[in-house]
Each structure stands twice: as C-alpha cells, then as structure tokens.
Image (cartoon, rainbow, N blue to C red):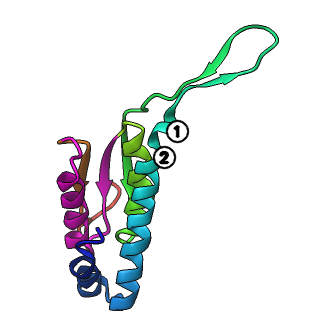
Amino acid sequence: MLERKETLARLSTLEMGKRISEGRSEIELSAAILQYYADNAETFLSPQVIESKIGDARLEYSPLGVLIGVQPWNYPYYQLSRFAAPQLMAGNVLLVKHAPSVPQCALAFEQLLTHAGSPAGAYTNLFLFERSGGRTDR
C-alpha cells in the first residue's frame, strides 16, 4: 500500500472528492492496520490454556467461514483494512459490497491483496447497485 500510496490516494480523490493529503493519510493508516495484523497473527490465533479447577480447558480459534461486509464510501481503504485484516488473518473468506461511488478504490484494494499473496477467492468484491426508481419491495 505504501509503495502505491500516491496512486491510491488519487483514486480516493477522483471517486469521492477526498483531499489528496487526507487520501495519503488514510493509506498510511490502512497500511499500518494491515501490518499490525500480519505481524501479530500467530500470537492472536495461538491456542491459550485456561486455568480451571474442574479440568483441562483451552481456547482455540477457528474460521467462521464466508463473511459479507457492506462498506461505506467515506473511507474506502481504512474501512476495508479494519474489516479485511483480522478476518483474513483468521482464515475467513470475504465478500465485500462497496458503495457505488468507489469502484476503483475497491478494485485497487483487491489487487493489493492479490499482489500480497492472498489466496484466490479469499476476498471478492461484489458490485451490487440499487436501481433508481425501481420498487424495493420485491
């Protein structure tokens, strides 16, 4: 992310009108979140022994499965990083529905994960748009 900071910040400026300085700051914060979970995954997910007077007890972590995230438009990288980093770390598969106004930011984030070695299908963008003027009760 940091290597592509300028390009990613410009995308958020183009798609949502964020000031370029705010876009750069968002990229730096998002990269720090991703790095934090990458650096601490083993510690966070390691089994823990729980002291018990009535027997042996352990706390273990397992993936939940497929998770769906609906993301807002105002922080296209930060919100994704907060959602994706801990869930991918834990082995969950993510389907992410983005705000219609930030499709290029969404694609760029998915490309970053692919480039970083994320398994195919672990993170998938869903581009679902509501039809304007249509009935919503069907």
Q: Which residue is mark 2?
A: 40
Q: Which residues are magenta?
A: 93-119
- Residue at image location 39% in from the left, 74% down from the top: 28
- In reply to whether residue 28 is colored magenta, the answer given is no
Measuring from the top left, give residue 5's x and y in whole percent.
28, 77
Label 1: few (<14), some (14–19) or many (≥20) C-alpha neighbours in 10 Å: few
Seen as rendered, the residue at the extreme top is 55
Q: Amino acid at mark 1?
A: Thr
In this image, 119 relative to 135: left or right? left
Q: Which residue is mark 1?
A: 43
- Residue at image location 40% in from the left, 52% down from the top: 85
Q: Is residue 117 above or below residue 28?
A: above
Q: Is residue 71 visible?
A: no
Q: Amino acid at mark 2?
A: Asn
Measuring from the top left, give residue 69's x and y in whole percent.
38, 53
Label 2 with label 1: CB-CB less than 8 Å? yes
Measuring from the top left, give residue 51's x and y in whole percent.
75, 20
Looking at the rendered structure, the secondary structure element under dot 1 is helix
Q: CA distance from mark 2 to mark 1?
A: 5 Å
The foreground one among 10 and 125 is 10
Measuring from the top left, give residue 20's x and y in whole percent.
33, 90
Q: Is residue 128 visible?
A: yes
